[in-house]
Amino acid sequence: MGCSMESIMAKSRPQSTLRTKKPARAVRAKKPVKLLSGGNPQIAKADGDAPVKAYIAAIPGWKREVGARVDALIVRAVPKVRKAVKWNSPFYGVAGNGWFMGMHVFTHYVKVAFFFGTSLTPMPPGESKSKDTRYLDIRENDKIDEKQFVAWVKQAAAIPGWMS
């Protein structure tokens, strides 16, 4: 008859046991985030807290701690802050009121941009080519004046921001 014991046993098994299990998917290691000029992380444009957290996690060296602290201070000052990554930079805004600030990493500092910073009292120290924007550059050994920073964030969040 040409039937082997194995083929007879296979025919008598329930159909579900005849199927071979699919091999388990190999767990892929996350690709490291590409760092652009100055060490700024290249993060895909997206809305929400997750892409901003991914951006901060990818910041190299001492600047990561600065980015995390800036983010935490913004959330403390504006609990319902809206977040996104645009043009490889975190943006912070208020729903229906636009974006009021952003952050970008450079080789020797973290640049915090207040998009309508000329409306803040006192104005953040860094001038811009844009007539409305003011910057705060945070270098490695700088201590952030958290009280002043939170005051700027609250002021910036209360005025109409940049719409995109």
Image (cartoon, rainbow, N blue to C red):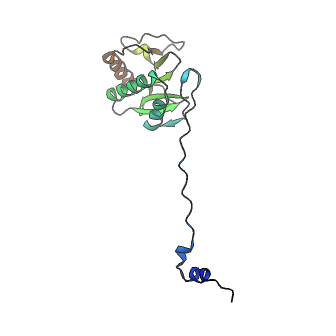
Which residue occupies the extreme bottom position in the image?
1
Question: Is 6 or 19 nearer to us in this picture?
Answer: 6
Q: Where does the image place residue 46, in percent across and percent down from the top left?
A: 51, 37
Residue 149 figure quarter:
top left
Question: Is 103 or 93 nearer to us in this picture?
Answer: 103
Residue in the image at 46% along x and 11% along y: 126
The total of numbered circles placed on residues is 0
Q: Where does the image place residue 85, in percent across and percent down from the top left?
A: 50, 32
Mark yes or no: residue 142 visible.
Answer: yes
Above-or-below relation of 33 to 138: below
Q: Where does the image place residue 86, in percent across and percent down from the top left?
A: 53, 30
Residue 94 figure quarter:
top left
63 sits to left or right of 36: left
Which residue occupies the extreme front position in the image?
5
Mark yes or no: residue 97 visible.
Answer: no
Which residue occupies the extreme right position in the image?
2
49 sits to left or right of 40: left
Tell me the quarter of the image containing the N terminus: bottom right
81 sits to left or right of 26: left
Q: Where does the image place residue 17, in percent across and percent down from the top left?
A: 53, 74
